[in-house]
Image (cartoon, grey):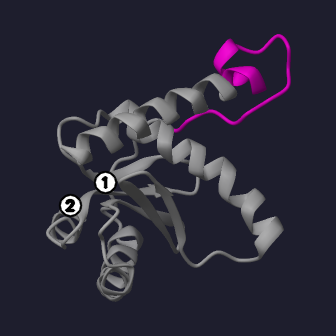
Amino acid sequence: MQTVLDQMNTLPGIVGSMVYDAEGHVLAKAFPALFDSEALASAAGVLLYGVPGLEVAAGAISTLDLRYGESRIVVRPIKGANLLLLCTRQANLQFLNISVGMAIPKIEKLLASPSAPPKLPAPSAPTSDPKAAPSDTIEGKAKELKGFEKAFLKMDSWMRK
């Protein structure tokens, strides 16, 4: 799967890519060293818990395109997982969709194989239990989202250079 992600990263405007499963485990990643595993797992968690709300409001999602400043995050669902691409604002979405369309069957085949990649720890689900650990409460998740916002701003400023 690493080879497929590395190939995706050669497309114009792609900064990094990763695959995370329906539980929020990062299965594979190809990002510059600036992006640590914890930040990527946090991003997967934010998207994991945010996308169902969007689906309730807008219906099934085939592509999620988030834009902020000079950067863009594109998420495409895969059977049992999601493909996330961090792009520059100039990335051509039509060309990207064609390339992703060819990569998804390869990734799905790799995910279905018995030698599927090991899973990294998943983020915890939000809860309103007052006795829960601070990061498991709604307030903790709000702080985590603000942390993700800071990471996203850092990514954006890095890409502006």
Residue 107 picture location, percent across and down: 34, 74
The furthest residue to the right? 129
Per the rendering, the mark at residue 136 is none
Kindly check if marks 1 and 2 are in contact, taking CB atoms under 8 A apart as contact: yes
Q: Which residue is at a point 38% across and 79% down the rendered structure image?
A: 93
Q: Secondary structure at mark 2?
A: helix
Q: Which residue is at a point 35% across and 53% down the rendered structure image?
A: 70
Front residue (pair 19, 120): 19
Q: Quadrant of residue 88?
A: bottom left
- 77 left or right of 19? right
**The residue stretch that appears in magenta:** 122-140
**Vertical comparison of 129 with 41: above or below:** above
Residue 82 picture location, percent across and down: 48, 64
**Vertical comparison of 11 with 39: above or below:** below
Q: Which residue is at a point 30% across and 80% down the rendered structure image?
A: 103
Viewport quadrant of the N terminus: bottom left
- 15 left or right of 78? left
Q: Main secondary structure of the magenta part?
A: loop
Front residue (pair 155, 6): 155
Specify few, some or many for label 2: CA neighbours under 10 Å numbering under 14, 14-19, or 20 or more: some
Residue 142 picture location, percent across and down: 68, 28
Specify few, some or many for label 1: CA neighbours under 10 Å numbering under 14, 14-19, or 20 or more: many
- Provide the residue designation for mark 1: 28
Q: Secondary structure at mark 1?
A: strand
Per the rendering, the mark at residue 2 is 2
- 74 left or right of 33? right
Q: Is residue 123 magenta?
A: yes
Of labels 1 and 2, earlier in sequence is: 2
Q: Is residue 100 magenta?
A: no
Q: Which residue is at a point 16% across and 64% down the rendered structure image?
A: 6
Q: Amino acid at mark 1?
A: Ala
Q: How much space separates mark 1 and mark 2, taking CA atoms?
A: 6 Å
